[in-house]
Image: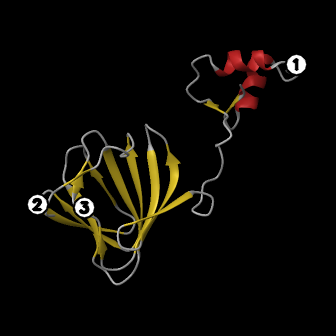
Amino acid sequence: MVKFKLGAIDTLNNLLGKNATFKSTRVWDRFATSNNPCLMEAKPWLMKKTKENSEHYNWGDNCSGWHLVKSERLSVIEELMPPKTQERKHYHNNSQQFFRILSGMATFEIENEVVEIESGSGIHIPPKVKHRIRNDQSENLEFIVISEPTTRGDRYEVPNQ
């Protein structure tokens, strides 16, 4: 198992000396697993993420989503909603969400309130709060939604909404 951080080699060299060489990964593993919070475990999925190299799905009325991060504990999705589209009002028992608007203007129905969120801004939705996002505008709405933990299996639609 190889662990790294930008600058980790410099840190290692400072701790072990500039002439240190590694003949096995055990020395690196001991250093990397020594409760140093700045280090990350290297994994095959550690790569630049874009819409082009992410899993795509369609939802609602011609809306699109791209899974940038898809795990049980965290979901990061880039979504696109065409003009005059909306999702069904729903809530999540366990998941909290943060929506960051990349372009366009989002209209959120949160419980019985209506809130407009412009490009460059975001909104936090705690668990158990009924909500929906709409695109009432005449241009595409693009946003990032971060869910913790994932909303898979934790979405409950509100009847007649």
Is 74 on the left-hand or right-hand side of 126?
Answer: right
The mark found on residue 15 in the picture is none
Mark 3 residue element: strand
Q: How many marks?
A: 3
Tell me the residue at 78%/24% (across/down).
Answer: 13
Tell me the residue at 28%/39% (across/down).
Answer: 94
Q: Mark 1: few, some, or many residues within 10 Å (few <14, many ≥20)?
A: few
- Asked whether disc 2 touches disc 1, contact meaning CB atoms under 8 Å apart, the reply is no
Q: Which of 27 and 58 is in front in this view?
A: 58
Amino acid bearing label 1: Lys
Tell me the residue at 25%/45% (across/down).
Answer: 126
Question: Given this view, does label 2 or label 1 mark the residue nearer the observer?
Answer: 2
Amino acid bearing label 3: Arg
Mark 2 residue element: loop
Mark 1 residue element: loop
Image quarter of the C terminus: bottom left
Residues at marks 3 and 1, CA–CA distance in whole angstroms: 56 Å
Q: Nearer the viewer, residue 118 or 126?
A: 126
Among all residues in the image, which is located at the extreme bottom?
138
Pointer 1 residue: 23
The mark found on residue 112 in the picture is 2
Badge 2 or badge 1: first in the primary sequence: 1
Question: Given this view, does label 3 or label 1 mark the residue nearer the observer?
Answer: 3
The mark found on residue 132 in the picture is 3
Badge 3 or badge 2: first in the primary sequence: 2
x, y percentage for residue 130? 19, 53
Residues at marks 3 and 2, CA–CA distance in whole angstroms: 11 Å
Image quarter of the N terminus: top right
